[in-house]
Image (cartoon, rainbow, N blue to C red):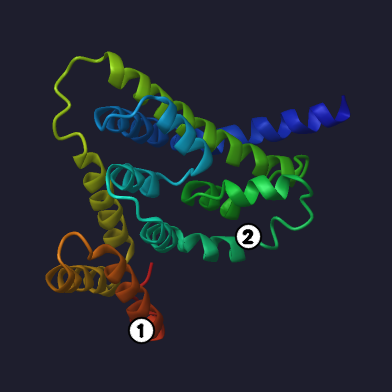
Amino acid sequence: MKEKGRRLRALKAAFPYTVPIFASFWFLGVAYGIYMNVSGFSFWYPLAMSALIFGGSLEFIVVTMLLSAFAPMQAFLVALMIQARHLFYGISMLEKYKGMGWKKCYLIFGLCDETFSINYTAKVPENVDRGWFYFFVTLLNQIYWVSGSTLGGLLGSVLSFNTKGLDFVMTAMFVVILMEQLKKEKKHYTALIGLAASVLCLVICGPDSFLIPTMLTILCFLTLCRKPIEKAGGLA
């Protein structure tokens, strides 16, 4: 009973932090599920991918991969480039997740952008177990995404409206992320590097092969120019 009480207190403390995530995850998740259905996949695909991959931007790109020729190495490199930021999230959370026992494996797996933001900055009440708090933040956020994606997959098979152009949701999502980043940055060096690298690689490699070279180019430039950019206030 004591352990059950600890879990319940942690759940009650974690839930309010995740309410804003619920709104955004459900909206994007439903759009993703419908997009999958429009692309020819049953609701089992968004359900499985949101549960196992749990990486929003990557999941949208995986739709294109599934419809393209079999290229495992390219898929691996794209996934690595897109999700590489999680390496830094993980390093930042080493101390916080220390000594979490069996929960640590799931906390590492479920460390998306939003979960990182909450677990890294939240002040856990003294009477709440930190491990269970982090666990429920992670679990609730994944439940929001999985349920939204599954619902979208189911709705996509019964809705009769014209879904032409729905695949633009991925482009819109990245545009919103870019706008948010522009608002946070004092200078726009990183955005300009990303734009220049994308245009250059698109011209050199063509629309079918420019993604991986673009990601590698951006990574190299940001690594080499990190200190000057930070000094000039070009990073959020």
Q: Amino acid at mark 2?
A: Met
Say if residue 186 shows up in the picture: no
Residue found at x 32% / y 18% = 155
Q: Is residue 93 above or below residue 133?
A: below
Please report contact status of discs 2 and 1: CB closer than 8 Å, yes or no. no
Q: Quadrant of residue 139?
A: top right
Residue beneath label 1, please?
A: 225
Residue 173 on image: x %, y %: 28, 46
Q: Determine the secondary structure under disc 2.
A: loop
> Which of marks 1 and 2 precedes in the sequence?
2
Q: Nearer the viewer, residue 227 or 32?
A: 32
Q: Residue at x 29, y 21 (%)?
A: 156
Q: Residues within 10 Å of mark 2 (few under 14, many from 20)?
A: some
Answer with left or right where residue 202 lies relative to residue 26.
left
On screen, 159 above or below 90?
above
Q: How many marks?
A: 2
Q: Residue at the spot x=24%, y=15% of the render? A: 159
Q: Judge the density around disc 1: few (<14), some (14-19), many (≥20) Cα neighbours within 10 Å.
A: few
Q: Nearer the viewer, residue 102 or 116?
A: 102
Secondary structure beneath dot 1 equals: loop
Q: CA distance from mark 2 to mark 1?
A: 25 Å
Residue at numbered disc 2:
93
Residue at (38% x, 85% y) in the render: 224
Question: Residue 110 bears which disc, if any?
Answer: none
Which quadrant is the C terminus positioned in?
Answer: bottom left
Q: Residue 15: percent from the left, percent from the top?
A: 58, 32
Residue 130 rendering spot, x and y as whole percentages = 73, 46
183 left or right, relative to 89: left
